[in-house]
Image: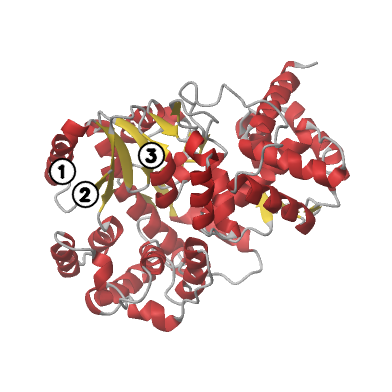
Amino acid sequence: MEDHIKKIDNYQLKITQKMKGKLVAKALENLIGKTPTNQQVAYVYSLLRVRNQKAQDNEPNDYLQIPVEYLFVLMTPFSVEDYNTKLKFKKYMATVTKETIEPLLDFISVTGHGEGYCRRFMLGEELMEEIKEELVKLMNGECDDLAFAKPDLNVGLKPAAWGGRCLRSNQLPEVTKKAWEKLRDSKFVFDLKLFNSAEGRKFNRSLNLSQDQQEAFLSALDDIRETNEPQYHGSFYIQGPGRLHTSGGPMALTSKIRKHYVKPTNKANKVMEMDLKCAQLIILCDILQASETKEQILSIIRTDSIWKHIGPATLPKEVKKVIIYGFCFGAKMSELPFLATQKAEKKLGYRFNVTKEIVNSCFEGILKPLVELRDSWLADYTIDKIEAGEIEKVIHTNALGLKFNLNKETSEYKTEVKKGKVNNSKIGGKLLSHLAQGAEQLIIQRLIGEQINENILTYSYDGLSLEVEPTKVTEVQERLTSWLAQEFPDSLLEFEVY
């Protein structure tokens, strides 16, 4: 057997030993009446992983448009570069397409391959129903027979290698590299005994999770080793603007679930959660040069929550957040009702119709000036102006030093939409997001790289949770607050200790 096939076989064996891999194997066995091959499990697992990630990111996830090289990366231990430069890997995926998909065509829809677009996959209704049934059993602690293979004891035993995607580890901005190295070397405990206990099952049922929320939970659990011992985080990746993330694990758990199951490595220690307060609105004010609005926001958040001052008091905070974050990251005002309705439903777990009137209500009062200022800013970066060569500065660099090329982004976007309707402000919105996320990440990544000496239990885009000795809680809070006030005077931290 060739060496690369041995490596792939070993990698796919490990997939069958993951929590989601075992769930997929059981669902396939129920449908086809026999034990599926490791390659079949890995294939469906990879498609489900993309679907789960979309659920986690609050994106539509029925049809999955996946480049073959990305599917290859999910199914094997090799990289996109390996696939693009080595013929043996293209031959491998061609074989997989024939030998793995064909026996499963009753349960997976696959479009033909054509130049200029990706295959589209859809996990069939019958397969998804089986997966949903096994997922409910998992959530309710009814999976005693889910024993397709022994747990993979290598997961989480050592710091994970850099995951990649946009940049290799040696291409990372220095500030990002320092933050990643601290995150990579940190550990956490997932209370598996609690998860499998009657109390854990009762808690899981009390969440009343929607299907998408259950899938997002499963996606997070997939990169958590089945043990109560301390374990390392999974591979980290970087998005284009510089945000670090994992594809699963405790970083992907919602706050309520994380607080219930993620514990310090030393039981005597406390968990200290911290978040940047209102970071994106303050950064947007800086980009738009809205100094007066910024001062109003700062005066509020020094003593209060900004969300009390945005929209009606009866509007759920989760809905306010998806509206405001969409606005900060460049979505058109006319798009916000649709986008917010989709994301709000996934956040809340039930249908919530976000109307134009609801969106407008969030931009009355202190935020009203930002609407006109942002519209004016986006009007300077329309696709029409970019293609006409009317924009002097084509390449923009964000606070992390990561570049955004207006011409390149425009070309890629128009190739993607082809004959569809072109959103003239699309690239301006992406540029705004690139600048805003870069500014946010500079703050949080510098904080991690320069000031965090404690073990990092979880990390999110604008916050993290630390493991702190009870006698040092005040000392740590004062150290981090003092540093932030000196380096980023307009940024504030809020803490929760438990």
423 displayed left or right of 457: right
Mark 1 or mark 3, whichever is nearer to me: 3
What residue is rendered at 60% in x and 50% in y?
A: 52
- The disc at residue 458 is 3
What is the secondary structure assignment of the residue under circle 1?
helix
475 displayed left or right of 128: left
The image quadrant that residue 361 belongs to is bottom left
The answer to whether the residue labelled 2 contacts the one labelled 1, judged by CB atoms less than 8 Å apart, is yes
Asked if residue 72 shows in the view, the reply is yes
- Mark 2, Cα crowd under 10 Å, few <14 / some 14-19 / many 20+, is some
Looking at the image, the residue that sits furthest to the bottom is 357
What is the secondary structure assignment of the residue under circle 2?
strand
Q: Kindly report the distance in space between the C-alpha atoms of the residues bearing marks 1 and 3.
A: 19 Å
Residue type at mark 3 is Thr
What is the secondary structure assignment of the residue under circle 3?
strand
What residue is rendered at 39% in x and 61% in y?
A: 329
Q: Position of residue 411 (x, y in %)?
A: 55, 57
Mark 3 or 2, nearer chain start: 3
Q: Position of residue 257 (x, y in %)?
A: 44, 48
Q: Kindly report the distance in space between the C-alpha atoms of the residues bearing marks 2 and 1.
A: 7 Å
Above/below status of 482 relative to 336: above
- The disc at residue 481 is 1
Colour setup of the view? secondary structure
Residue type at mark 1 is Thr
The image quadrant that residue 9 belongs to is top right
- Mark 3, Cα crowd under 10 Å, few <14 / some 14-19 / many 20+, is many
Looking at the image, the residue that sits furthest to the front is 198
- The disc at residue 493 is 2
Q: Position of residue 414 (x, y in %)?
A: 58, 61
Q: How many marks?
A: 3
What residue is rendered at 37% in x and 35% in y?
A: 457
